[in-house]
Amino acid sequence: MKTIILSFAILASNLAFSQTLPEIRSAFHEVVLNPKNSRNFHQYLKQVDRPTATEKAYQAVSEALLAQVVWNPFNKLAQVIKYDKEMSVVVAEDPENIEIRFLRLAIEYNLPSFLGMSEHLEEDAAVITENLSNIHQIQLEPSYSKYIIHFLSQTGLCSSGQISLMKERLALHQ
């Protein structure tokens, strides 16, 4: 009987923590709007069993987002360094993934320039624009795809022509 209860408890806990990318994206968006939820987001992502490259990217991003709520400057820097190491591995694992590149671009764009850790902005913007025709393959929600394009247009990393082209490509795949 104990074995059955234990098996059920393990199964229930696995189901409770089986996140999907749309849920993770939504949680990410909430943390961007309210950084106080960074710790919860980080804990939420630690529960992902056998994460994909994209899920690993969100896990790395959660490290950087924790830096927003940590008081000590040394701890902030440690969080960003941990993010940087993890994200480098993830990008190497799936270098053409638009979502992974967007996540790195978004974090690096918002890092203070004196850290010298924003070296991939142009590279990531280029990979995103070059591979946007494959956006349907990663099954992004249309609203999230639009969010990526809007973010890129606000950064100034893409020309208005590139933004228009991305919008056209997105419209073709909706």
Image (spheres, rainbow, N blue to C red):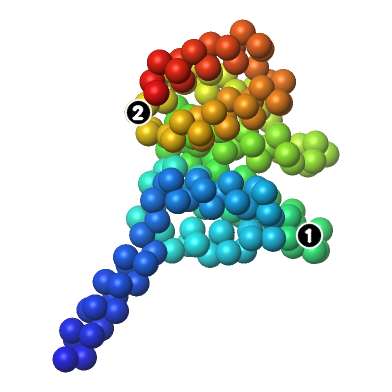
Q: Residue at x 53, y 17 (%)?
A: 167
Residue 157 in view (yes/no): yes
Residue 170, percent from left and from top: 46, 20
> In this orientation, which residue lies closer to the viewer: 162 or 143?
143
Q: What amino acid is found at the position of numbered circle 1 in the picture?
A: Phe
Rate crowding at label 1 as few (under 14), some (14 to 19) or many (20 or more) other CA atoms within 10 Å: few
> In this orientation, which residue lies closer to the viewer: 172 or 38?
172
> In this orientation, which residue lies closer to the viewer: 137 or 172?
172
- On residue 43, which mark appears? none
Asked if 81 appears above or below 163 in the picture, the reply is: below
Rate crowding at label 2 as few (under 14), some (14 to 19) or many (20 or more) other CA atoms within 10 Å: few
- On residue 137, which mark appears? 2
Residue 136, percent from left and from top: 37, 26
Mark pair 2, 1: CA separation:
40 Å
Q: Residue at x 57, y 38 (%)?
A: 103
Q: Which residue is mark 1?
A: 74
| SS of the residue under disc 2 | helix
